Image (spheres, helix red, strand yellow):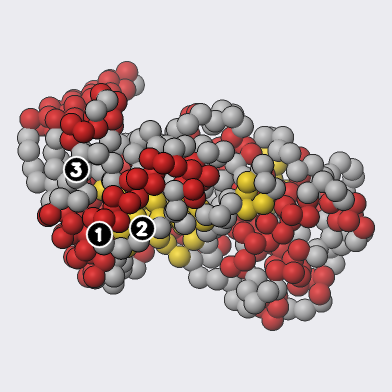
Amino acid sequence: MHSTPAEARTNSIVDDGHEARINWVVACGERYWPDGRGELVAALPQQPTSWTASRRCEMVELPLWAVEAGVGAPAALLVDRAAIASGDGPAFDRCNWFAAAFMFLTGAQEGEASENSYSGAVGDTDPRLFERAWVNRYMLLLRKLAARHASRPEHELFGAIPKSEIDLTHDVDAVRKTLEIRLKQSAFFGFNAARSALKGEWRSARQKAMHGIRFFTTTPSYQTIEPMRRMEAEAGLRSTFHVYGGPPGLRRLSPLRMLLDPGYDAGSTDLRDQWRGLLEGGWQIGVHPSFQSSSDPERIGREREAVERACGRPVTRCRQHWLRFTWADTWRAQSRAGLQLDTTLGFNDRPAFRNGAALCFRPWDAEAGAARPIHALPMVFMDSHFYDYRSIAASERKTAMRYWIDELRAVGGIGSVNWHPHTLSEDYGWKEGFRDLLDLIS
């Protein structure tokens, strides 16, 4: 049986706040040890290692009894090197799995990332972090460790591995085609055409350029919320629509807000009826805070209240527009604005488990040394990852989405996915991809 001296855990947590961090990690993984059994996990002996990330990772090979928690052959888990104590013997026996989980969950791999959510902005973060729900796999391993230390069967102590949950969501960025949408998206198509041309992909460049021209010159309907609702109902699913609550139209005032923020009025009569119809049918409404709001609790609060007035019910969940986010400020601002659940944690340009986790957790507040009063649920992928940012055939998109959903299911995790309603319009033609997503979920 794997074991380390019991005093190792005691020595590692004296007067330095590690006890609180251990308990926080256990709380983050509570779906894996129901009925208060997390105490058995928190009591596990552990190696006295650093809790400060080195930002350098390595794969730690697992013993035969733990291979179900790992990936590859031989089965292994990605770990920040700082969570591995120095010394002789297998790295597995020297690894502090609580410290490893803490480093990934808190985004320590990203360092001083700027206020955006593009994967290229997170410096030299090991890209392997984004490919798997590593922290969930640590939780599966900790279940096994606790059972071995108690000399009892794992299923007897903790029950079955939890079933995965997929949180289906939609960011309502557009309900009609405006001039700023034409300019913004046409420019994006032009950029992609130029990028293809630089690679010598002339056919692709021409197709993207022509798409940009068609996008700018045509005016299809963006009234796609009702068709989306019907498709979900047929699949037996319900989702959350995140609604913009900022000033509409010319009331956005600044050129930046005019270009980047949605321009509709959430409280207009036609939209108010749609929100309330969704709620009556079992869907949820959240707020989609504006581009420059990610560290501004007053602005987020005003926009939340505007959406509440429009739908007639309390709004407690959100996703920041453009996924604008900082680890230090965004969750603080949202919780001060009265929100309880955020699904911003993800990337604009690629699918990812951004903090190596598929968990609904209360983020760590480094200043307070405790959990924040808000829950975070990572966004694993959204529609544009498989259309705008990757040149893949339609037949490959479902396979690409399946990879991330399969990982969620393999670890019994929970994650959010995002599909924008206006992409069901003729402008985009992403309706078939949405059908594939519903098929994968249901």
Name the secondary structure under disc 3. Answer: loop
State the residue position of label 3. 264
Q: Nearer the viewer, residue 150 or 78?
A: 150
Q: Nearer the viewer, residue 204 or 21?
A: 21
Can you tell which mark lies on residue 315? Answer: 2
Residue 88 placement, left or right of 348: right
Q: Nearer the viewer, residue 86 or 64?
A: 86
Task: Give the amino acid at mark 3.
Answer: Tyr
Residue 78 visible within the image: no
Instruction: Indicate whether 332 appears above or below 313.
Output: above
Cα separation between marks 2 and 3: 18 Å
Instruction: Indicate whether 86 appears above or below 379.
Output: above
Residue 140 in percent (x, y) is at 65, 63
Q: Residues within 10 Å of mark 3 (few under 14, many from 20)?
A: many
Task: Give the amino acid at mark 1.
Answer: Cys
Earlier residue among tags 2 and 3: 3
State the residue position of label 1. 311
Residue 424 placement, left or right of 108: left
Work out which residue is located at the far bottom of the displayed protein and give it.
Answer: 156
Marks 2 & 1, CB-CB < 8 Å contact:
yes
Task: Give the amino acid at mark 2.
Answer: Val
Which residue is depicted at the point 62% across and 37% down? Answer: 109
Which residue is depicted at the point 84% across and 51% down? Answer: 13
In the picture, which quadrant includes the C terminus?
A: bottom left
In the picture, which quadrant includes the N terminus?
A: bottom right
